[in-house]
Amino acid sequence: MPSKEAPVADWVTIPDLYRDPFPIYERLRAEGGVHWVPAVGRYLITSYAAVHETELDQSVFSANEQGSLQIRAMGHSMLRRDDPEHYLERKAWQPTLRPGVVKRHWQRVFERTAEQYLDEMVAKAQRGGDADLIWDFAAPFAAESLRQILGLHSASQQDLQRWSQTLIDATGNYADDPEVWAKGKRSFDEVDAVLDEMLPWHAANPNESLLSQLLRIPDYEMPMERIRANVKMTIGGGLNEPRDVLGVAAWGLLAHPEQRRAVEADPSLWQAAFDETLRWIAPIGLYSRQTTRDVELTGVRLPAGARLGICILSANRDERVWDDASAFDIRREVKPHLAFSKGVHVCLGAWVARSEVADVALPMLFERLRGLELVPEKPAEIGGWVFRGMLRLPVRWASVAPRTAAAPGAPAGAGQAVAPRIAVVGSGPAGCFTAQALRRRFPSAELDVLDALPVPYGLVRSGVAADHAGTKSVTAQFDRLFLREGVRFRGNLRLGTDVSLDALRGAYDAVVLATGMHADRGLGIPGAALDGVHGAGRITRLLNAHPDEGDAPSLGERVVVVGHGNVAMDLVRLLARDADGLEGTDVDDEAHARLAAGVRTIHVVGRSGPTTAKFDPVMVRELAGLPGVAHRVHGAALEALAEGKDARADAVRALSAASAEAARVEVHWWFGLAPARVEGDGRVERAVFASADGEVSLLADAVVTAVGFEADADSPTVPGSHPDGRVEPGLYTAGWLRRGPRGTIPDQRTDARELARTIADDIDSGAVALGAPGLAATPGEVGFDGWRRIDVLERLGAAPGRERVKLKAVERMLAAAADAGIPLPEVAGEAVGSGGGLPVTVLFGTESGGAELVADELRRALADRASVEVRDLAETDPSGLDASRLHLVVCSTYGDGEVPTAARAFLRALEEQRPDLAGLRYGVFGMGDRSYAKTYSRGSELVDEALAARGAQRVGEYGRHDAGGPVLATEAARDWADGVLSVAGAAVGV
Ligand SMILES: Cc1cc2nc3c(=O)[nH]c(=O)nc-3n(C[C@H](O)[C@H](O)[C@H](O)COP(=O)(O)O)c2cc1C
């Protein structure tokens, strides 16, 4: 699309924007999302895509605006600086606002403060005054909390409110009103005076406050005028954000009674209410940027020096991202909103605001003020576009509950009087994660997981590549469900054959179908049905000894694999490995020998270029390191791409660099080729592809298609037809049946949590009635103990160097399951006492504290099984790592796919000192944000690669957490660590 000049939106006025910016933004987005707006004297950036782009490239979209009003009003704070200057100041602010510190220290302060102002509002109402939720509660609460955090003890909360308002007014003084400047200047001077008073006091009295911490940064002394400017910026922005999100959230809930009831019944929804409020009406609605050069933004040309207004209020309502975006809906599918910004300026106070509002003030408000409601004769008012929030919010209530000792927001009690009976059909990752999420939500529910086979775990057993034991180890978490958490496995029950869907629905209150999609999608080109064309799913199942597959064919010498996704990568790797390379796996050796023994050349062919290919770069790097395999790359056009900017491109570069000595197998990587036809006389002889430069014809004995999966012929629903997983109340879908064949195993965890909530909502609302009788035992059914006997037999039968030999025939599985002579291994007790058990070191690498919080949570959660110590990577010397301890690395990603600053020295030391870490076992949990598509979780991968390069061995599932997703990092990390510990513990007999 050729670029164009920015359209001029001369119809936009500031008073209209102030009153209600949303209809204006809707039109601007519809017209492209980048406009010159004369009334504002700026380009307004209104679409999500354009806003997001500006946030991720500070070299072009600079925060350091020339002639900035904010600099005039408050001084030059970090908000108006780019890196590296910005970063130094940000780092100084960070320790006080880290989530661990917020949780350990500030949350108690917020609780006390909220109690105080709630009591004062109640007392005012008792004296006959009108209660306004904004001015009597939210504003003093936010101001006092901020006063405490800053450590401005010689000022009052009223001072902070006045300073905040007047400094903000001056920042937005586009009309150059001298009175506004005068008031701003007065506040400016007053803040300086208080700082002059308080800084010496903090120097002499160390404490948790920001001012005190600022004076104690080991390697950096912030110049005084920067302290002054940043404190003013913090007063300006740090007060209205929690005040306004609290006010708008209360308004939203009071105006939507059914959502209010849901959140009151399930306090875990306060976080969802908080995030939805931020998405719906972002308190900081606009901020500025300036272009540093001519640039094109979503097809519109912007000149160098252009002043931009980044409209967060608008981006968060972009209809291309959210359905029914203007509605307040705390149950909507979670997608990353931009209210805290993204990129280097992401809000430092986000954890504070979350704690103040979602953990403390909202739950307390609704719990204590019974019958809280709006006052119809005094309607609430809202206004603003640069900052938007409630201007007044009159409320009343029926009665006041006494203060409770329990922390507000604690999870609800046991729940329903009658426990629900729920069946999950399919014991693959989607089914098991669903059962796990349901168990958390309904501790006393009767939960059955059915499977057509006598053995559990579906895709993990038969779809995950045999040599990826780490991925397979997710089953350790699932074992816990069946061994300890009362979930029942009911194997050898095939839906439609052994039990009908109607019978299941009659027997259970709710049924979740998680039966997956198994059929390989065809190529749909001439010759696709020739002999020698195989689906990748089938080949993978053959290698995994799936009972439904027959004998494995020989693939011959030359194999063409069509597709560049992870399924294709798995296949290429398994075909390229020789038997020695399968040490420790559970591969079906016979099938592997038949399929792969003759393979000498593999062509792996995809339509797109390396940067947009679907593979995980980690998989490609793994291929680059395979011994005895040479790689040739065709059509990748990597010359134009700088190194270090794109993880996929870098991984493909690593292929070309891989050593090709004594190659047993040669892998040719083709980019930009579309399949045209398969040729041959009765069976495959050639695969022909179309490219921009004409046709490419590859000689082939076999073609394996890895271009996706489609619904099975007998699929109970059409995959993807119910994206929220609810077919109707009482019948749900999960996994690939819900979304189609996309997403990784950990993604299923995220979906499962949402689905459990949906089911809980249906039960709460009465849409699903409880009381179903349950499903009687069916002849031939195999329970979890039956599977454990099969498991024992498979392990005992393993050849040297193999983990197990899978039983392939169902009859043999059934015989093993029923054989009481096979002794069941004892289920190891978990409670080995605090401080006992496996020695574990949790190493965290963090920038803003999330990973530290996760590390703390792991210390707590693993205490009954392990003796845990927690260490910051910043203070860890890799040469001193103790190989007798299992190391759990929790690390986030910053910058352009880098490790957090604090972890850089560790990484460097690994590379420079080159310690021998053979024998050290470690697990990795990467924290990142999927919206950084090219560098998602890359920081953790760098640590992983560096440890592996020193001989350390990764165990268990590679855990990942997406900060933009709905699952809490602590929760995902607990599940991940359970799995890693089960694998590591089993290895050392704990
Ligand atoms: C400036 C900045 C850059 C980031 N870059 C990436 C990135 O390249 N890839 C990624 O997956 N996540 C990225 N993130 C997201 C963080 O890794 C994520 O929010 C994580 O949970 C933060 O953990 P921490 O609090 O322990 O540092 C970035 C975040 C910020 C603020």
Image (spheres, helix red, strand yellow):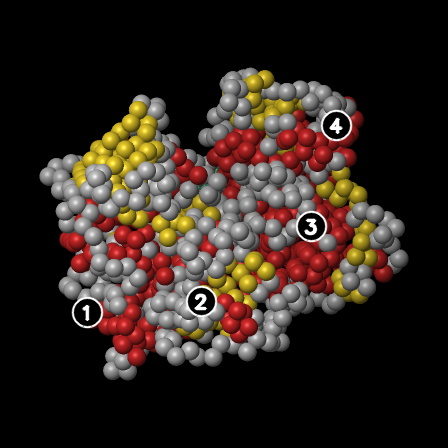
Q: Residues within 10 Å of mark 4 (few under 14, many from 20)?
A: few
Residue 715 on image: x %, y %? 45, 58
**Residue 788 falls in image quadrant:** bottom left
In whole angstroms, how far apart are the C-alphas of marks 3 and 2?
A: 47 Å
Element assignment for label 3: helix
Q: Residues within 10 Å of mark 1 (few under 14, many from 20)?
A: some
Give SS at disc 2. loop
Tell me the amino acid under the disc marked 3. Answer: Ala
Dot 1 beta carbon under 8 Å from ligand 1: no
Residue at the spot x=72%, y=50% of the render? 252
Task: In the rendered view, tell whether residue 637 sits above or below residue 965.
Answer: above
Upstream in sequence: badge 2 or badge 1: 2
Q: Residue at x 43, y 53 (%)?
A: 711
Q: Residue 797 has which mark?
A: 1
The mark lying in front, picked from 3 and 1, is 1
What separation in Å lies between label 3 and label 1 (alpha carbons)? 60 Å
Q: CA distance from mark 3 to mark 4?
A: 25 Å
Q: Quadrant of residue 515?
A: bottom left
Q: Residue at x 53, y 69 (%)?
A: 502
Would residue 345 appear left or right of 804 to someone viewing this image?
Answer: right
Q: Which residue is mark 4?
A: 14
Q: Which of the marked residues, 3 or 4, is nearer the chain's N terminus?
A: 4
